[in-house]
């Protein structure tokens, strides 16, 4: 447990993805079975036991420490598990035959079978035996609040790196594996055969598109491509298959392979034929696709209530078929997969699942026109939920990852405004010596004439060279410092104008300006423009009305 | 007492009549300038210029320039000279550990505090009452300074920097092992260790040497003078090199000591993908480490932790405890729960080593080379 705790501790502070992988690989290499397997399970969320309630932890500490001192300490530290881990009194264990601290395996296997009444005494014994970091990790584990910035995907990628394998291979076999993954590690270390996936509903790594740039079209022939609308929903993979008893089983995965079936139980009955659909999850009301803002209200809910299901009817718009029954279709060219998809959707014959229509075009000009006006180019009333077009090579197989060439996304032009840099904050990780997070504002009429009101924050979109330029500007034009935040000069004739691109606007009572931007980023630095010529809040208000009609 | 010290003033002589019934607070009392000893005619670690100052150690929140006469250990005086120049005080007098000095109606003695090189607790005895002002102290092992000396007393004045039971520092050698393991795991990256330039930096270097690390260790410019001074005083620190002027690629796999504030500034851009470490007792608390953008927190402290504070307080045998800078409330509560009279001393101006380090860094003139495009504009 202490070793796993040290890993968690270090991972929690490490911002770099590659460095996290390196730390994980070193741990998997140095740790024996079955501890490392249970660690992989903990990191991928594959462990299941009843979690301890914070109240139980609090009771344990108040029995052992001065409540006043605990109060001061908790106030200072701000996290219950951490406070308890740090101030847990050193155990006065009798004799010198102290038991060794529990291993991760001890903890996991004990918790699986432990009765509720025995939990407090068992926890206390472990807390006595572990060091500070060990206690912290134990408490995070048993309360089910790990949150250390590691995705399941990253943990699997690190496991793959241990055996120099492709992480997609692990993704493919993952649903058939269970902790402590002895056969997986045996294969990764070249001591065993590749585990066979017996899961009827495995996740298949998804294919992603590159953003197309104006210059790319010159090298592309319109005849080689077919186009579809780019829907502003959630990319999902819907998989169904027969389990060992011959029953149909269905699963819904996010694009990273996370099982999200539990959030959309209303879609499961519709997946009644064995196969794997790649598509977009949308909310449809009266046959009309709702915007992402609406869909968002169905996401990240702990409880999926009947009311939620009724108010936000979920829908799958299919654009690819990766498997049909036992057949893997991924090696086939798109045109053949599309034909099979059309047949498959027809056989499903379900109102919750339909085809993503293709957008006919003969030239790039025609497609540009359709993209500029989806409403009259076939999207009709669903045009609000279209965020551009997707281009797919007709002859391309379904390739995992983001290969360059076969798939392109051509997003609708973003909205653009000119705003004034107001505050800057240091970034994180590699950017911690740069002022790289920017708050920008637009003009509005205030009590004492025109003033700037903040309308958003952006921390990307600029090149490395531009980052250096802004950083230099911030350092030379700071008017005040508040901790990590610098106030940057923003007067009508003094300051920096940023061209900000964004995808949408929403009303927001939380912002002083009353509007919030979706996906804002810095698209250009307007050194040429004096701040007084930046945009006004009224411009955003007008945009908001034309976008939402309200 | 040797010649250079000024005589007692008439004012003090006039007041000596009440000494027979003296209470501890008549011997030492907190005033805006610091801890004042009226019967001895001096202040301890004053934060404002005073006629006569007794200084516990060289950290800039305790040792300030501009006093009339300064009494301190030789090392503390040397460090003040390094920081503030030759004329940092009107006159100075060096005192050895254990040496008794008569000042007015009191006797003062300096004892090792184990905090940094030259650090001292100051014992003030008047009649039968002994008060020990411990300054900053630690009871943990430190190869760069004399170990903490326990001085039995009636009133013990303790700091409370880490005066909460969540602060238990563990063995510093284990933390250095963590640093070395990281350096081994990431040989292509540079390791930057933030550490206060007086004391902590040298202790980390000494611990690295004890752990068998014998490669050159690099120093930020603000560390150089004080670190070389430690070497002059016979503390073995191995081969040290300035980080200044090194090529980026040459710094891969190296360890560099820097003031904490430098580890998140433009200065770091000369290092290849640096791992930012910070050696401090504050690193025990995750939120503190995260706030500072630290990737490798090292729990190494030059202050006593909770167990150290409470054990020391009990061992002095003092019946009355005065608690200064830090988490006074919790420590006062603990003392009272053990039947000791205790009260917080509301002294201001201490415990901001960080701040003074920042000043030291800003004063440091680093060359603007090696792909470092941005000159820091200093705000007054």
Image: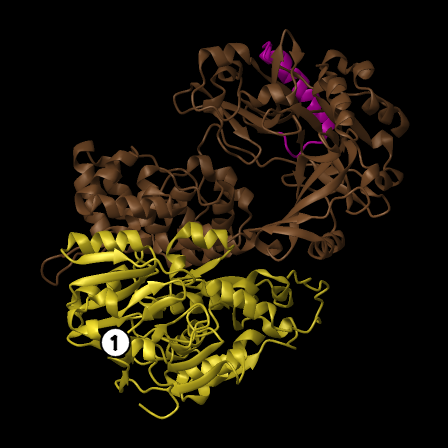
Q: Main secondary structure of the magenta part?
A: helix
- Residue B84: x, y in percent? 53, 78
Q: Mark 1 lies on which chain?
A: B
Colour assignment, chain A: brown
> What residue does disc 1 label?
B123
A38 lies above or below B280: above
- Residue B265: x, y in percent? 60, 61
- Classify residue B58 as left or right of residue A467: left
Tell me, by letter, which chain the rendering colours yellow. B
B179 lies above or below B250: above
- Classify residue B337 as left or right of residue B97: left
**Residue at point 26% right, 73% down?**
B15
For mark 1, give the secondary structure. strand
Out of A282 and B371, give the one closest to the viewer. B371
B255 lies above or below B376: below
Extreme residue in the bottom direction? B3
Segment tinted magenta in the rendering: A329-352
**Residue at point 47% right, 68% down?**
B195
Q: Residues within 10 Å of mark 1 (few under 14, many from 20)?
A: many
Q: Quadrant of the C terminus of chain B?
A: bottom right
Q: Is residue B343 visible?
A: yes
- Residue A247: x, y in percent? 42, 18
Extreme residue in the top direction? A286
Q: Disc count in the image? A: 1
Q: In which quarter of the image is the N terminus of chain B?
A: bottom left
- Residue A378: x, y in percent? 79, 15
- Judging from the image, the colouring scheme is by chain
């Amino acid at each position: 447990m202490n070793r796993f705790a040290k890993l968690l501790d270090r991972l929690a502070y490490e911002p770099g993805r590659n460095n996290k992988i390196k730390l994980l690989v070193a741990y998997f290499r140095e740790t024996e079975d079955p501890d490392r397997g249970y660690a992989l399970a903990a990191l991928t969320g594959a462990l299941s036991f009843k979690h301890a309630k914070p109240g139980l932890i609090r009771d344990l500490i108040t029995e052992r420490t001065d409540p006043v001192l605990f109060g001061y300490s908790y106030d200072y530290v701000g996290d219950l598990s951490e406070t308890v881990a740090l101030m847990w009194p050193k155990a006065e264990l009798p004799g010198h035959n102290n038991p060794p601290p529990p291993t991760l395996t001890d903890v996991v296997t004990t918790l699986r079978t432990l009765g509720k009444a025995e939990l407090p005494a068992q926890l206390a014994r472990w807390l006595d035996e572990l060091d500070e970091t060990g206690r912290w990790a134990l408490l995070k584990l048993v309360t089910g609040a790990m949150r250390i910035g590691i995705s399941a995907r990253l943990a699997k990628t690190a496991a793959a790196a241990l055996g120099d394998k492709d992480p997609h291979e692990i993704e493919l076999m993952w649903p058939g594996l269970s902790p402590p993954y002895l056969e997986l590690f045996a294969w990764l270390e070249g001591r065993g055969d590749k585990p066979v996936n017996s899961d009827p509903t495995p996740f298949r790594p998804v294919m992603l598109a590159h953003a197309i740039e104006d210059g790319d079209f010159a090298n592309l022939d319109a005849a080689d491509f077919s186009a579809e609308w780019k829907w502003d929903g959630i990319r999902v993979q819907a998989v169904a298959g027969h389990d060992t008893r011959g029953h149909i089983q269905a699963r819904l995965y996010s694009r990273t392979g996370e099982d999200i079936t539990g959030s959309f139980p209303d879609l499961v009955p519709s997946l009644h034929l064995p196969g794997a659909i790649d598509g977009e999850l949308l909310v449809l009301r009266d046959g009309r696709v709702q915007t992402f803002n609406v869909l968002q209200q169905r996401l990240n809910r702990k409880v999926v209530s009947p009311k939620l299901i009724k108010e936000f009817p979920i829908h799958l718009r299919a654009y690819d078929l990766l498997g049909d029954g036992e057949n893997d279709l991924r090696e086939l060219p798109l045109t053949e997969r599309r034909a099979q998809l059309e047949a498959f959707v027809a056989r499903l014959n379900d109102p919750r699942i339909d085809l993503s229509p293709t957008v006919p075009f003969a030239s790039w000009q025609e497609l540009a026109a359709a993209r500029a006006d989806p409403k009259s180019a076939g999207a009709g009333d669903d045009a609000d939920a279209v965020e551009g077009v997707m281009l797919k090579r007709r002859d391309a197989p379904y390739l995992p990852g983001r290969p360059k060439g076969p798939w392109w996304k051509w997003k609708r032009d973003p909205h653009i405004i000119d705003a004034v840099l107001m505050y800057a904050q240091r970034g994180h990780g590699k950017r911690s010596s740069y002022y790289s997070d920017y708050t920008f504002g637009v003009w509005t009429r205030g009590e004492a004439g025109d003033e700037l009101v903040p309308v958003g924050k952006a921390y990307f979109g600029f090149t490395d060279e531009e980052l250096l330029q802004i950083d230099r500007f911030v350092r030379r034009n700071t008017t005040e410092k508040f901790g990590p935040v610098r106030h940057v000069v923003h007067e009508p004739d003094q300051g920096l104008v940023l061209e900000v691109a964004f995808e949408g606007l929403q009303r927001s009572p939380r912002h002083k300006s009353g509007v919030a931007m979706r996906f804002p980023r810095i698209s250009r630095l307007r050194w040429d423009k004096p701040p007084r010529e930046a945009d006004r809040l009224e411009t955003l208000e007008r945009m908001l009305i034309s976008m939402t009609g309200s | 007492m040797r010649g250079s010290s000024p005589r007692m003033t008439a004012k003090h002589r006039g007041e000596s009549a009440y000494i027979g019934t003296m209470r501890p607070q008549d011997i030492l009392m907190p005033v805006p300038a610091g801890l004042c000893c009226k019967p001895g005619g001096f202040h301890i670690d004053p934060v404002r210029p005073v006629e006569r100052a007794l200084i516990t150690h060289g950290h800039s929140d305790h040792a300030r320039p501009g006093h009339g006469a300064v009494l301190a250990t030789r090392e503390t005086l040397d460090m003040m000279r390094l920081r503030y120049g030759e004329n940092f005080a009107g006159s100075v007098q060096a005192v050895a550990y254990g040496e008794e000095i008569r000042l007015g109606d009191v006797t003062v003695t300096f004892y090792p505090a184990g905090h940094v090189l030259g650090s001292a607790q100051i014992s003030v005895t008047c009649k039968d009452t002994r008060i020990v002002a411990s300054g900053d102290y630690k009871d943990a092992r430190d190869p760069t300074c004399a170990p903490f000396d326990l001085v039995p007393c009636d009133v013990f004045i303790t700091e409370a920097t880490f005066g909460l039971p969540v602060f238990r520092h563990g063995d510093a050698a284990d933390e250095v092992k963590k640093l070395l393991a990281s350096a081994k795991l990431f040989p292509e990256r540079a390791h930057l260790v933030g550490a206060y330039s007086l004391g902590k930096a040298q202790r980390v270097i000494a611990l690295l040497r004890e752990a068998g690390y014998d490669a050159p260790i690099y120093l930020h410019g603000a560390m150089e003078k004080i670190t070389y001074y430690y070497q002059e005083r016979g503390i073995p620190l191995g081969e040290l090199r300035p980080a200044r002027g090194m090529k980026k690629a040459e710094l891969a796999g190296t360890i560099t000591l820097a003031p904490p504030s430098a580890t998140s500034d433009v200065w770091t851009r000369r290092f290849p993908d640096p791992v930012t470490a910070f050696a401090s007792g504050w690193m025990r608390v995750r939120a503190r480490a995260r706030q500072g953008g630290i990737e490798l927190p090292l729990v190494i402290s030059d202050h006593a932790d909770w167990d150290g504070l409470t054990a020391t307080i009990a061992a002095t045998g003092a019946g009355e405890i005065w608690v200064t800078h830090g988490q006074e409330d919790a420590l006062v509560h603990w003392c009272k729960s053990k039947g000791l009279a205790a009260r917080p001393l509301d002294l201001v101006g201490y415990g901001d080593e960080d701040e003074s380090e920042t000043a030291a860094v800003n004063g440091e003139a680093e060359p603007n080379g090696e792909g470092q495009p941005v000159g820091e504009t200093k705000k007054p």
